[in-house]
Amino acid sequence: MKRCFGLLLAGCCSVLATARAGASTTKDAFDWDSITPSDDLEYHDCYGGYKCARLQVPLNWLNETDARVATIAMIKLPAVVPDDDPTFGGAIFTNPGGPGSSGVDFLLVMGRYLRHTADKPGRRHYEIISFDPRGIGRTAPASDCFDNNLLARDAFLLENRGNGALTNGDGVIAYSMAIMDAFGQRCQQAGEDAMAFVGTPNVARDMVEMVDKVDELRKREAAARESENKGDDSAVRTELRKRAAPRRKPAELGDEPGDVPRLQYIGFSYGTVLGNYFASMFPGRVGRLILDGVCNIQDYATGPGWLTNTVDSDEIFDNFFEGCAAAGPEVCALARPSDTRGASDIRRRFDSFLSDLDQKPKSVLLDSGDVVVVTSWDVLILAGRVLYNPAPLFKVLARKLNDFIAGDLTQMAVMALGLGMVPAMQDACPLDRANVTKPTIVIESQNAVVCSDGDDVSGKDLAWWRRYVRSQLDVSRVFGATWSTIRMPCSGWRIRPNWSFKGPFTTPDPDPALRPGRPAAPILFLSNRLDPVTPLRAAQAMAAQHPGARVLVQEAMGHCAVASAPSKCTRRAVADYFESGVIPSDLSPCNVECRPWDTSCPATDDAALHNNDDEMEAMASWFNRDEAVWHRKSPLGLL
Ligand SMILES: *[C@@H]1O[C@H](CO)[C@@H](O)[C@H](O)[C@H]1NC(C)=O
Ligand SMILES: *[C@@H]1O[C@H](CO)[C@@H](O)[C@H](O)[C@H]1NC(C)=O
Ligand SMILES: *[C@@H]1O[C@H](CO)[C@@H](O)[C@H](O)[C@H]1NC(C)=O
């Protein structure tokens, strides 16, 4: 660790590090600097059983003479069979959403469950690949407005938090616009060169490159195997010659033959945005595409932005109260035997707790020395996070709210720290990024993508933002304040993207015969019946824009179907689609195995018991990871 801003912080570091053990600064178990970045894909063993690579791509895909590069951190969970096995089905790429989330982190927690989901034992086996997209995590260059000065970033975040919820009135909005104006200037000075190139069109083009490089490596290795058998290296030489072919310019990708390497992909949340850009920009590169937890791409890429995500969230929160009343005090800590009017009695207790907090925010002094002022917004942020994962978390939320209402807000304050609602000041200690180890999601990673992809809203005035915040609140009471903050940094954002794509977000008719410029299969969309941030109606609207596409509905609440509750039916649909590329016309809804007020979840309990089965154990640990869910950081993502 370098110098730690003197004694004050040196002292606080150790205290906070203990108080927040398990937060996002644990040491990365793999040293990415040990890999020399390369133009061709070169895997290295990492994280015990995974393969990692640092692939160099042009920073600027639109200017061939621009020699700058981006170095993409890639990770692969190998298939359970070797590449030359007849059941090997190639690579499935995945993205966990965000924007701003690390695909590497995601693969490490979800990879084995995804492989289990897509595989058909004995018939079809895949490797799973993910990567940190531009400006995110271990991919370079980083989106960084603070020149590695983590204390300065935390100070900015603290001031921003102290300003309060944007729904608290004009004063807050006006002050926020001023903070974001300074932030925007700072970002332009510090990171314009990097952050002009993090927009989703660049990432989609990077995926084409990764698909090509995965294919090249596979052919090279196959040629090497063949040569070894025949004792003749002409096959290897042929492959090496091909490898030297120049990269195609984006415009030329439209004129490719049909038998080019194609993407197999499952993207979640913002990952559906990435998938939709990919399909719309490079339809001839689509092999199989599953988009789960679907974002309305027009609302994402154009207009004020982010105004349609949360339309179903209040209904899920209503269901929390209804379900609590139905489950009764034995199961739901918020219910009372004396309640005569069920959910509305419970709701009234919650509402009056919130309005009391509005009248009088509570200050909590923690043993660590941290002072945390808890507001009603903190409680709504917490509730909002729970709506992403009702199955494991509704019961937990009921217990916590019950404690809060009883007057014990210590846990709320501890959670506010742990959840990152209050900036984690211990981050300020290791000043050199090389030793910060595992990346935290920095605010710029998200902002740079959100502001690049969306329309330019810098220069909008107070009245415009007042209307914007009002609209967010009209859409959702739970999420209004939180969702307003996503676009707010764009009010001062000055960096315009080098590459912008505004649609049309559509694809030509798919053709399994691999015809040039056409997807090999229609897109399969997945959605829960009720999703707090990517509603079913968005999935239906997006499917209507892609010929042949259909929506599989999972009868559950939560964010993203595959990720929110175990469902054999959904898993089967995913595996069938990856194998055949066909979406049945009688696509009926899928049930799930675990529901929010169930006292146990047999699917994951069984999986945990039979822990000799690697894949089932992976499933249990994904669905039982309460802790990680509480630490969720990205609005449209699984991490
Ligand atoms: C392309 O990049 C080169 C090298 O950085 C630069 O000199 C040139 O101006 C760029 N071209 C355009 C059209 O921006
Ligand atoms: C990171 O920390 C280790 C041990 O604390 C030290 O040896 C190493 O030089 C540091 N790396 C950098 C880049 O400062
Ligand atoms: C991006 O850069 C290329 C080449 O440097 C340039 O021709 C193009 O106009 C730029 N695009 C935008 C949107 O600035």
Image (tube, rainbow, N blue to C red):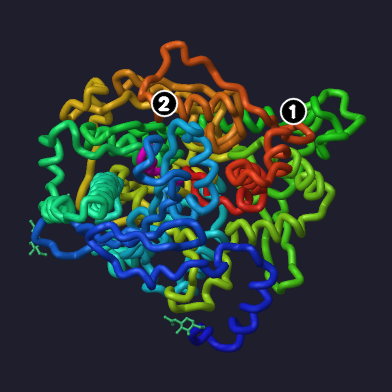
Q: Which residues are magenta?
A: 89-97
Element on which disc 2 rests: helix
Q: Position of residue 575 (x, y in %)?
A: 46, 29
Say which residue appears at 13% left-offset and 33% top-offset: 257
Q: Position of residue 19 (x, y in %)?
A: 69, 69
Say which residue appears at 50% left-offset and 87% top-offset: 3
Q: Amino acid at mark 2?
A: Tyr
Q: Amino acid at mark 1?
A: Gly
**Residue marked by disc 2:** 577
Spot the residue most to the right: 338
**Residue marked by disc 1:** 323
Nearer the observer, 27 or 627:
27
257 left or right, relative to 496: left
Q: Mark yes or no: residue 304 visible.
A: no
Ligand 1: image quarter: bottom left
294 left or right, relative to 476: left
Q: Position of residue 292 (x, y in %)?
A: 46, 33
